[in-house]
Image (tube, helix red, strand yellow):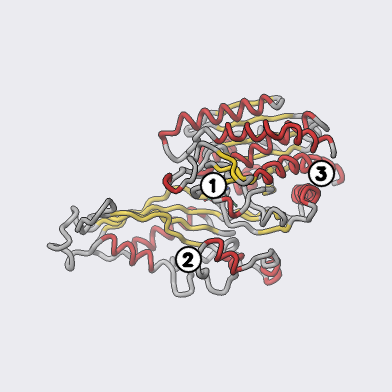
């Protein structure tokens, strides 16, 4: 066993307990009632960075939640890796579906159950522990910066500003992020694409007050019925989105690229079985792997209005609402798409209702290179620890800041995540494998070593 593996082995229990402590702080960024807990999490992360011996650590307040920044410069001429992650988590709702409370982590069947276990506390904390491992064994082979934010799950708006205002400080040769998936614990992979996002909210108003559905029903248009009809019309029979102009900028991939994407192992039957569905139903002409990565989507995230309490109440409601999001692919622009959506949604409303459309947050799509030194370093590191070369895959989730790192700072990212699709991120009973946590801690030091070595060769 090498020095790093023995160090991890000897400190396993403590490294696990520290993560559990971090998971106990409910850093829900979306809900203002957790503001203080979010701040406490930032302080906890800053302390953790200081404890492992990172030279410079600071908490940067923003108009929203704080950003934790740290750097360890070993040699100004050495290459620099910027490790990005997020310490905020999604709301834990629906609470009643959790088998154990979301902020009281438990380890069951070698998995850590808690909100944020995989997304992203368990994953970014691997980078802090990997630093500790290097510091106490073979040393730090390159300059390392840490940027751990508290607003990823709500669109990273304050981080956008921070990145724009701190280009010099954040200067680096590569961004390294662990906030994505591998295919399976015995099939390592590295994502090289992220989709963008436009997130909308709509309000449909009918009569000026809630009405008795017996006295008025039949004559007065019901805003919930209207909203459902409008939403249903947003996709055609081939599951293509009907918003005019929506596909105008979508890049069509070459047959070679599509074949490359479809090389990744995928079993349709197992996929459906794992989700408890009889079949998939995506855009015609594309495989599931394509539908969930290189094609844009439109989904209703929530819909409400009228009476939703116990029992029955006969009412023809005045208002209906929905939250609707669209995943975007290169070269769709979230602002443009939001405008197209708004214009179209208003245009399809019957004159019996009034429609209001508002814009929540968005993010640009990103594709990262697979022939760069950074990707090679990640690939070699994973090959070393998994015993298998990782497969490049196009991902479907979004990490809004990735596109900005490239546009604003000119820095590319490597998405070396260790989660699994089955980790239930954003869902009840989110979990992260103990295997995956330590695999990350073992692999990240190798990334830094290979990145430093390969950069010298260039
Ligand atoms: N870590 C996820 C994104 C992700 C997960 C990418 C798995 C690839 C594989 C991230 O925390 C996330 O959930 N992002 C949000 C975007 C945000 C603007 C709310 C998303 O994708 O919904
Ligand atoms: Mn995440
Ligand atoms: Mn997330």
Residue at image x 73%, y 32%?
11
Mark 1 lies on a secondary structure that is loop
> In the image, which is nearer the foreground, mark 1 or mark 2?
1
Residue at image x 38%, y 51%?
358
Badge 2 is on which residue?
245
Q: Position of residue 345 (x, y in %)?
A: 37, 61
- In the rendered view, tell whether residue 200 sits above or below residue 281: above
Q: Position of residue 405 (x, y in %)?
A: 63, 44
Foreground: 57 or 172?
Answer: 57
Q: Position of residue 354 (x, y in %)?
A: 27, 58
Q: Seen in the image, is 265 located left or right of residue 247?
A: right
Tell me the tag on residue 430: 1
Direction left: furthest residue: 215
Foreground: 253 or 268?
Answer: 268
Q: Seen in the image, is 439 located left or right of residue 196?
A: right
Crowding near the residue tagged with mark 2, few <14, some 14–19, many ≥20 C-alpha atoms within 10 Å: some
Which badge, 3 or 2, comes first in the chain's sequence?
A: 2
Badge 3 is on which residue?
450
Marks 3 and 2, Cα distance to the nearest angstrom? Answer: 44 Å
């Amino acid at each position: 066993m090498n020095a790093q593996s023995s160090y991890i082995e000897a400190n396993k229990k403590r490294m696990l307990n520290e993560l559990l402590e971090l998971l106990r702080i409910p850093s829900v960024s979306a809900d203002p009632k957790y503001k203080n807990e979010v701040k406490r999490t930032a302080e906890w992360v800053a302390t953790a960075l200081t404890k492992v011996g990172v030279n410079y650590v600071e908490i940067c307040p923003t108009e929203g939640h704080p950003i934790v920044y740290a750097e360890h410069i070993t040699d100004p001429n050495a290459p620099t890796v910027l490790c990005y992650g997020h310490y905020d988590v999604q709301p834990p709702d629906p609470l009643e579906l959790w088998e154990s409370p979301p902020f009281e982590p438990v380890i069951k069947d070698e998995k850590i159950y808690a909100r944020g276990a995989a997304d992203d506390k368990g994953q970014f904390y691997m980078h802090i522990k990997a630093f500790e491992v290097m510091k106490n064994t073979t040393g730090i082979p390159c300059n390392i910066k840490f940027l751990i934010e508290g607003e990823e799950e709500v669109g990273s708006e304050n981080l956008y500003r921070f990145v724009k205002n701190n280009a010099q400080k954040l200067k680096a040769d590569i961004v390294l992020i662990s906030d994505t998936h591998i295919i399976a614990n015995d099939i390592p992979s590295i994502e090289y694409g992220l989709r963008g996002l436009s997130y909308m909210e709509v309000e449909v108003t009918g009569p000026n007050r809630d009405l008795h559905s017996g006295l008025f029903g039949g004559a007065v248009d019901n805003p919930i019925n209207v909203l459902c009809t409008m939403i249903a019309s947003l996709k055609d029979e081939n599951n293509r989105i009907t918003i005019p102009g929506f596909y105008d900028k979508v890049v069509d991939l070459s047959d070679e690229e599509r074949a490359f994407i479809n090389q990744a192992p995928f079993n349709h039957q197992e996929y459906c079985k794992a989700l408890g569905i009889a079949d998939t139903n995506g855009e015609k002409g594309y495989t599931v792997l394509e539908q969930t990565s290189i094609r844009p989507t439109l989904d209703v995230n929530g819909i409400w209005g009228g009476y939703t309490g116990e029992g029955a109440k006969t009412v023809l409601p005045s208002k209906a609402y929905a939250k609707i999001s669209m995943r975007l692919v290169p070269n769709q622009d979230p602002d443009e798409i939001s405008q197209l959506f708004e214009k179209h949604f208003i245009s399809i409303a019957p004159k019996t209702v009034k429609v209001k459309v508002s814009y929540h947050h968005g993010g640009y799509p990103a594709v990262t290179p697979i022939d760069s030194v950074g990707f090679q370093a990640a690939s070699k590191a994973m090959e070393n620890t998994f015993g298998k070369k990782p497969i490049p895959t196009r991902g479907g989730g979004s990490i809004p800041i990735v596109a900005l790192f490239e546009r604003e700072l000119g820095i590319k990212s490597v998405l070396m995540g260790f989660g699994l699709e089955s980790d239930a991120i954003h869902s009840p009973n989110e979990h992260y494998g103990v295997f995956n946590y330590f695999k990350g801690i073992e692999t990240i030091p190798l990334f830094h070593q290979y990145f430093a070595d390969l950069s010298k060769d260039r």
